[in-house]
């Protein structure tokens, strides 16, 4: 009898699933604020379900009002802009070489970016660090 009461209780409480949607049109490369998003009662697979998961992120594509935000639509904000001068660091073992480079693309922390070494005029690839420098690997 106790099991039946628990089952009936579970059936009367519906699970509420929500999706995050923009409240206005948001252009690419715009940082999402709390005023620009809200929750809708609809649940769409592959979309964000919490406002905290999208606020502070940057849009990769145009987001339209009322359409759910999918996981590939946003990314952490870029900290290296295209054509910006960035510290270029090569470190192996105990040897560290630092110079300046010009970023050929924009990227956020942890992403790979192409950079032109300004001393040698050679393009290299490295990973953007949290401080905006680019760590070059072999």
Image (spheres, rainbow, N blue to C red):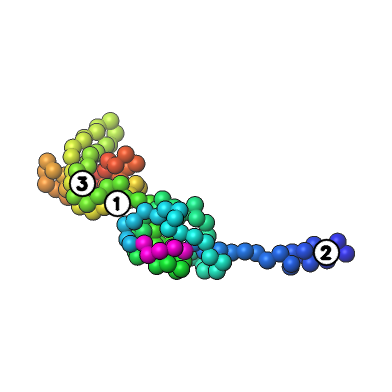
Q: Report helix, strand or loop for mark 3.
A: loop
Residue 104 x/y as whole percent:
20, 52
Q: In this figure, which residue is indicated by the disc labeled 1?
A: 107
Magenta stretch, main secondary structure class: loop
Q: Report helix, strand or loop for mark 1.
A: loop
Residue 45 x/y as whole percent:
52, 67
In reply to whether residue 38 is colored magenta, the answer given is no
Q: Residue at x 34, y 56 (%)?
A: 30
Q: In this figure, which residue is indicated by the disc labeled 3?
A: 84
- Residue 94 relative to residue 71: left or right: left
Q: Quadrant of the C terminus?
A: top left
Crowd tier of the residue under label 2, counting other residues whose Cα lies within 10 Å: few below 14, some 14–19, many 20 or above: few
Residue at the far top in the pictured view:
94
Q: Report helix, strand or loop for mark 2.
A: helix
Q: In the image shown, does 104 or 15 lie closer to the viewer? A: 15
Q: Residue at x 62, y 64 (%)?
A: 16
Residue 67 x/y as whole percent:
45, 69
Measure the alpha-carbon separation of dots 1 and 2.
55 Å
Q: In this figure, which residue is indicated by the disc labeled 2?
A: 5
Residue 29 drawn above or below residue 101: below
Q: Are marks 1 and 3 in contact (CB under 8 Å)?
A: no
Crowd tier of the residue under label 3, counting other residues whose Cα lies within 10 Å: few below 14, some 14–19, many 20 or above: some
| Residue 76 in view, yes or no | yes
Measure the alpha-carbon separation of dots 3 and 2.
65 Å
Residue at the far right in the pictured view:
1
Q: Earlier in the sequence, mark 1 or mark 2?
A: 2
The range drawn in magenta is 21-26
Residue 20 drawn above or below residue 31: below
């Amino acid at each position: 009898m106790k099991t039946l009461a628990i089952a009936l209780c579970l059936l009367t409480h519906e699970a509420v699933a929500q999706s995050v949607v923009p409240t206005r049109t948001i252009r690419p490369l715009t940082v999402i604020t709390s005023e620009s998003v809200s929750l809708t009662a609809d649940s769409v697979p592959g979309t964000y379900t919490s406002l905290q998961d999208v606020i502070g992120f940057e849009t990769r594509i145009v987001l339209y009002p009322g359409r759910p935000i999918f996981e590939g639509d946003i990314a952490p904000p870029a900290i290296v802009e295209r054509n910006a001068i960035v510290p270029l660091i090569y470190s192996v073992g105990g040897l560290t070489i630092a110079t300046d480079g010009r970023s050929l693309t924009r990227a956020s922390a942890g992403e790979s970016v192409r950079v032109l070494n300004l001393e040698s005029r050679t393009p290299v690839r490295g990973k953007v660090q949290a401080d905006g420098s680019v760590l070059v690997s072999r």
